[in-house]
Amino acid sequence: MSTFLSIRLLSSPMALANFAVYGVLLGQGRAVLGLSLQFLLNGVNIAMSIWLGYGLKWGLAGVAWGTVIAESVAAAAGIVILIASFRGYPSPTIRSVLNRPAMGRMFTINRDIMIRSFMLLTAFAFFVRSGTQLGLVILAANAILFRFFLVVSYFFDGLTTAAEHICGRAVGANYPPAFHRGVRLTILWSMMLAIIMAVLIFYMGGHLIAVMTNAPDVRAEAMTYLPWAALTAISGFLAFQLDGVYIGVTWSRDMRNTMALALIPYLAVLFTLTLILGNHGLWLTFNIFLLARGLVMLAILPNRTRSLFAESN
């Protein structure tokens, strides 16, 4: 672990640069180019890790160096792309780059989103912790079923990114009709995707569970609670979609506060329902948490939207 981390830490500046480049490309609506850079990063990572780790027999250190090389190659390619994209535009001055109010706003947004992410991870951690108290078999079954929720979240990420770009561009242009249409369309498409994913997980989840584990008792427990995992697609789609809207408009404080409003009652009832209903109560509480967060964000959306465009006018 020490060997791996000491090498991987060398790529930290490149990793941060890749995040920044990817964010710029998504903000410009150039998602295909961003995806191409991700393919480059992961392709180089796989190739170099195999060559250095197995081919040159560097072992774990080779795998770590492979990742460092991949991060560096992707960062270099991304920076070249951005330089080419902004060619012809006047270079920003040091004073404009170090503008204190602008930097303060950036760090405030980053702080709020980071706090929101920590609270989400807290909800996940307590879900796992509560599952451990129900026995190892249920813990293993929940770990498999939670993968279905994570896969669903990856599918929603595409629509979340679309909502970020569409709504952010509409606010930048001060054009409310485009904003409202973007919100409605991304909600509609997210809902349709949620229904499709829920149906697929419900009817095909058993085959995937059989692939993911060969333990009969774990398979049986996972099948018992599979409907709850399928339901997370429907209970969680609104929160995922509105995350995109709120990020696109930089309502980071509202994201943080709505997460807190959903997390507090979640933690309050988690242990009670788990104690009464067992693992059914655990999954019920988790679905309520996802649904509550989406509904709270939806409830404050109209007032925030009116305030936003009233200020810009």
Image: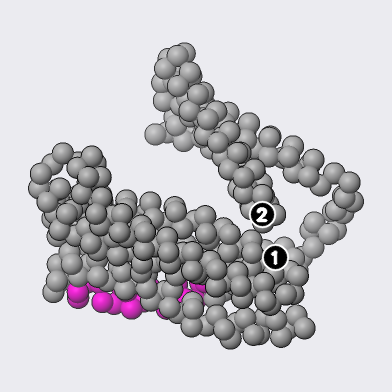
Task: Please provide percent x and percent y for residue 196.
Answer: 36, 59
Position of 98 with respect to 104 (left or right) is right
Q: Nearer the viewer, residue 252 or 280?
A: 280
What span is colored magenta in the figure? 255-273
**In the rendered view, would you say 157 is above or below 298?**
above
Q: Which residue is mark 2?
A: 29
CA distance for labels 2 and 1: 9 Å
Q: Nearer the viewer, residue 204 or 127?
A: 204
Position of 291 with respect to 135 (left or right) is right
Asked which secondary structure carries label 1, the reply is helix
Asked which secondary structure carries label 2, the reply is loop
**In the rendered view, would you say 161 is above or below 261?**
above
Q: Which quarter of the rendered picture does the N terminus lie within?
A: top left
The outermost residue toward the top is 56
Q: Which mark is residue 169?
A: 1
Is 96 within the magenta?
A: no
Q: Residue at x 67, y 80 (%)?
A: 308
Q: Which mark is residue 233?
A: none
Main secondary structure found in the magenta portion: helix
- Amino acid type, label 2: Gly
**In the rendered view, would you say 209 is above or below 39?**
below
Q: Residue at x 79, y 42 (%)?
A: 83
